[in-house]
Amino acid sequence: MAGTRMTLIEILLALGAAAVLILAVVLFLAIVPGLLGVLAGAIPFLLAVAGLYSCLRSKKPRNVKVLWVIIIVLAPILGPLLWFLWGSANT
């Protein structure tokens, strides 16, 4: 049962990643106004959130999860795409 629970480190890592993503989206929306800015900011944010959720819920070892979370946060479009195409499938 302990394998299905998220540890405190994983929760803090997810919260920190979410804070960085929210800050990036807010800054991007401040630069690109209007509907284009909303769409351009929402797509990377949603991709990153979905990638983070999928990564943290996977059965990968903790060190692999940490590496993937860093990749997803630093590259909010390419990171989640790489996770879904390659990372989640390879064990």
Image (tube, grey):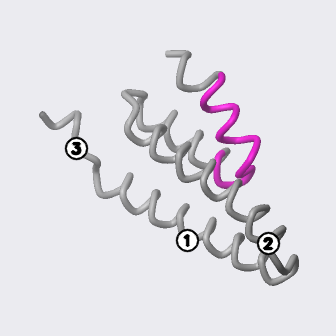
- The residue that appears at 54% across and 53% down in the rendered structure is 49
Residue 90 is situated, as x and y percent measured from the top left of the image, at 55, 16
The amino acid marked with disc number 3 is Arg
The residue at which mark 2 appears reads as 35
86 versus 74 height, above or below? above
SS at badge 3:
loop
Q: Quadrant of residue 79?
A: top right
Which is more N-terminal, label 2 or label 1?
A: 1
The residue at which mark 3 appears reads as 5
Depth order, front residue of 14/49: 49
Q: Is residue 56 left or right of residue 87?
A: left
Residue 83 is situated, as x and y percent measured from the top left of the image, at 62, 32
Depth order, front residue of 82/46: 46
Q: Which mark is residue 19?
A: 1
Q: Is residue 9 left or right of residue 36?
A: left
The CA distance from mark 3 to mark 2 is 39 Å
State the extent of the magenta-drawn residues as a range: 72-85
Which is more N-terminal, label 2 or label 3?
A: 3
